C-alpha cells in the first residue's frame, strides 16, 4: 500500500498548526520531527506490506510470485515470524529444496517462530529428496519441542520404514494413533501396522534361524579344528616314538665290543 505523506502529515495535525504559528523555526523543527517519525516507521509498514502481499500470493498457490515478497519481508526486522514458514514452503513447492531447508533452519534460530513446524517442514524436504536419515532427524527434533504433536510421529514413522527400521516405525504409528485417534488414516495405519508386525516377526524368525545356523557352523568348525588338532597331536606323538626308536637302533650299530676289538695281541 503506497504511503500518502501529506495525509499522514495532516493526521499529526501540524498542517493547521503551522499556518497559525509565528515562530517559523519551531514549526520547521516540528515538521522535521514528523518527517523523521515517518521515515522510522516506514520500514515496519513496508515489511508488513511485503508479508501481507506475499502471504496472499502463497494462499493463492502462486509460490513463484510470493517468493521475492516473502524474502524481502524475511530480512526486515519485526516481520511476522510465520514468514519463514511461508517462504520455505514456497521454495519447497518450486523444487528449491536447499533454499527451503535453509529458510526453515534459519527460522528455528529466531525468537517467536513455530520451531516444531519449521523442523517438520525441513524433514519433509529431506524426505522428498529421499534423504530419509536426515528427515528422521528433523522429525525427531520436532517431537523434542512438542512431544504431543502427532504429525511428527507419522512422518518419522514413514522415514523409518524407508530405512528398514520397522519396529521403530510401528512404535511411531501406534503413538500417532494415540495422539490423533480420529485421524482419517486410522484404518489404513492399523492395516499397515499389522503388515509390518508380520514382517517384523518373520524377520526375527529369520534372524533366529540365521543365528542358529551361524552358531552351528561355528561349533562344527571348532569341532573340526579340535579333531584336526587331535589327529596332528597323535601323528606327532607317533613320529616322535619312531624317531626315538630309530635313534636307539642306529646308536647300537656303532658301539665297540671291548672284549673283541680292544684285545691286545
Image (cartoon, rainbow, N blue to C red):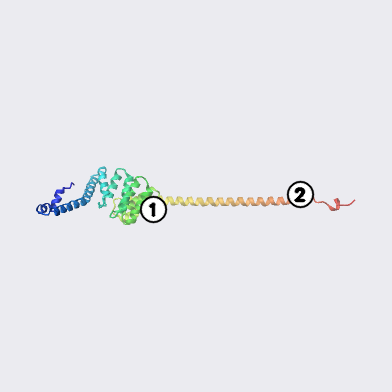
Tell me where residue 169 appears, x and y as whole percent.
37, 52
Disc 2, disc 1: CB below 8 Å?
no
Question: What residue do we see at 26% from left, 47% from top?
Answer: 72
Secondary element at image label 2: helix
- Observer-nearest residue: 50 or 3? 3
Secondary element at image label 1: helix
Q: Which residue sits furthest right?
A: 265
- Observer-nearest residue: 100 or 132? 100
Question: What residue do we see at 34% from left, 52% from top?
Answer: 139
Disc 1 crowd rating (10 Å Cα; few below 14, some 14-19, many 20+) is: few
Say which residue label 1 marks: 168
The answer to whether residue 187 is seen in the rendering is: no
- Per the model, the C-alpha gap separating discs 2 and 1 is 78 Å
Return the mark for residue 250.
2
Question: What residue do we see at 56% from left, 52% from top?
Answer: 222
Specify which label sits upstream in the sequence, 2 or 1: 1
Q: Which residue sits furthest left?
A: 20
The answer to whether residue 36 is seen in the rendering is: yes
Tell me where residue 208 appears, x and y as whole percent.
47, 52
Amino acid at each position: 500500500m503506497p504511503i500518502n505523506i501529506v495525509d499522514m502529515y495532516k493526521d499529526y495535525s501540524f498542517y493547521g498548526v503551522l499556518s497559525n504559528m509565528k515562530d517559523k523555526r519551531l514549526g520547521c523543527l516540528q515538521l522535521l520531527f514528523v518527517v523523521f517519525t515517518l521515515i522510522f516507521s516506514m520500514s515496519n509498514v513496508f515489511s508488513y506490506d511485503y508479508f501481507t502481499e506475499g502471504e496472499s500470493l502463497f494462499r493463492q498457490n502462486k509460490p513463484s510470485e510470493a517468493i521475492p515478497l516473502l524474502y524481502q519481508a524475511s530480512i526486515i526486522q519485526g516481520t511476522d515470524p510465520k514468514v519463514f514458514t511461508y517462504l520455505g514452503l514456497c521454495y519447497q513447492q518450486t523444487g528449491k529444496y536447499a533454499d527451503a531447508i535453509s529458510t526453515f533452519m534459519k527460522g528455528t534460530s529466531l525468537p517467536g517462530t513455530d520451531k516444531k513446524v519449521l523442523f517438520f517442514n525441513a524433514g519433509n524436504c529431506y524426505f522428498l529428496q529421499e534423504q530419509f536419515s536426515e528427515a528422521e532427524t528433523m522429525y525427531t527434533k520436532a517431537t523434542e519441542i512438542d512431544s504431543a504433536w502427532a504429525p511428527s510421529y507419522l512422518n518419522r514413522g514413514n522415514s523409518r520404514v524407508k530405512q528398514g527400521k520397522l519396529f521403530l516405525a510401528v512404535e511411531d504409528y501406534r503413538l500417532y494413533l494415540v495422539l490423533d485417534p480420529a485421524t482419517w488414516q486410522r484404518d489404513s495405519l492399523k492395516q499397515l501396522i499389522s503388515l509390518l508386525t508380520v514382517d517384523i516377526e518373520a524377520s526375527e524368525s529369520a534372524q533366529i534361524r540365521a543365528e542358529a545356523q551361524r552358531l552351528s557352523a561355528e561349533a562344527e568348525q571348532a569341532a573340526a579344528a579340535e579333531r584336526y588338532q587331535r589327529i596332528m597331536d597323535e601323528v606327532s606323538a607317533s613320529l616322535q616314538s619312531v624317531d626315538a626308536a630309530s635313534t636307539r637302533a642306529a646308536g647300537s650299530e656303532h658301539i665297540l665290543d671291548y672284549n673283541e676289538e680292544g684285545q691286545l695281541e
